[in-house]
Structures are given as structure tokens and as C-alpha cells.
Amino acid sequence: MKRIVIFASGSGSNAENLIKFFHNRDDVSVIQVLTNNPHAKVLDRCKKMNVSALSFNKIAFYDTNHVLNLLKSVKPDLIVLAGFLWKFPENIIAEFPNEIINIHPALLPKYGGKGMYGMHVHKAVVVNKEKESGITIHYVNENYDEGAIIFQAKFDILTSDSAEDVAAKIHELEMEHFPKVVEKILLNTN
């Protein structure tokens, strides 16, 4: 059984999608969801789906080994960042090399880096009159959005598209592709 731990900061739609995708399977399971936001909607989603979910603070994440030790105790095969907004600490990256991935709502290397998440990305894409946007799934390293790219999917942006329209199209791509890419990574399938 391959074990997934998800980190999320907000509503948790990607986390829920992953949990549902791997529900009742005997080869892959989401065993834990962790959030840096004690008020995140992802906690409610996990409760409804009977998945363990915990929140933590900056001290537990950056200044102590509390989160690292929790991860070591549950032994994940893959750590998945699904709308997680904090920079990942190097001690966790070092402990789980090439076992941490992130989904980003743009075609990296464009529109990545600190502060580039959610509607900030979509507004920048529209303001700059980009012709296309999409999602990037990549490995996590010590820098925001700079790890090796695993997968990208894109769509053409219409001149009439608002930032909200772009966000909706991004969401569709995330729902369609993210679980399948996670599955391929874990099961080494093509």
C-alpha cells in the first residue's frame, strides 16, 4: 500500500479530489492531511470523509521537528502539496528527497515564486494578456516553484476571459489531471 500525506492551506478541493480518487483502493491511500491554517475548510472536508487531518503552526513547521517527526512516523511514499502556501523547510525536503510534489496554477517557470498563488496568478496572467495558461505539477525543492517539472496541461485564454474564467479552467485541469499524475508517480505507470 502506497501512502500519501497531503498539505493544504485552504478549501481543500484538490485534497478532496485526491482522497476520493484513491478511496477504497488497496494499492494507494491518503493517510493524513496537514494544514497550516486551523480554520481551513480542508479540515471540514476531511472530517466528512473520515480522513485524519491536523493543523500545525510555524513553530512546529520551521523551528522544531514536530512536523518532520510526524511525517517520519506515518512513513509516506509521497507528500503532495495541494494549495499549500508556506515554503517547505529544507529539513523535510532532505528527509524525503524526490518524494514531495506541488501543483501550481500556472505554466511554470512563468508566474511562480513567493506570493504567486490563486487569484494573484490568474489576475497577473489576464493583465499581461497571456495567450495560454495551465497547471504545473513539479517536485519541491528549497525554492518556491523551481523544482523539476513532472507534468503540465494548458488551455488557450480567450480575449474575453476574466481572472475568474481562468481560475475555473485551471480548476478543471487540476481535477482532471492531478490524481492521475499522483497515481503514475506512485505506481510508476505510463
Image (cartoon, rainbow, N blue to C red):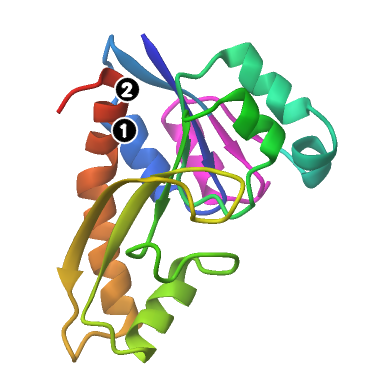
Q: Around disc 2, counting alpha carbons within 10 Å, would you say few (fewer than 14), some (14 to 19), or many (20 or more)?
A: some
Disc marking residue 71:
none
Quadrant position of the N terminus in the picture = top left
Q: Indicate whether 172 appears above or below 16.
A: below
Residue in the foreground of this view, choosing between 91 and 4: 91
Disc marking residue 182:
1
The magenta segment is 33-55
Q: Secondary structure at mark 2?
A: helix
Q: Residue at x 47, y 30 (%)?
A: 98
Whether tag 1 and tag 2 are in contact, CB under 8 A, the answer is: yes
Q: Residue at x 56, y 25 (%)?
A: 96
Whether the magenta-drawn stretch holds residue 107 is answered as no
Indicate left or right for 21 with 86 as reference.
left
Q: Quadrant of residue 141?
A: top right
Q: Which residue is mark 2?
A: 186
Q: Residue at x 24, y 21 (%)?
A: 188
Q: Around disc 1, counting alpha carbons within 10 Å, would you say few (fewer than 14), some (14 to 19), or many (20 or more)?
A: some
Give the x, y percent position of residue 71: 62, 22
Q: Residue at x 85, y 39 (%)?
A: 63
Q: Indicate whether 139 appears above or below 115.
A: above
Q: Quadrant of residue 94?
A: top right
Whether the magenta-drawn stretch holds residue 43 is answered as yes
Q: Indicate whether 13 appears above or below 25.
A: below
**Label 1 vs label 2: CA separation?**
6 Å
Q: Quadrant of residue 22?
A: top left
Q: Indicate whether 68 appears above or below 125.
A: above
Give the x, y percent position of residue 170: 28, 63
Give the x, y percent position of residue 70: 68, 21
Quadrant position of the C terminus in the picture = top left
Q: Secondary structure at mark 1?
A: helix
Give the x, y percent position of residue 53: 57, 31
Q: Amino acid at mark 1?
A: Val
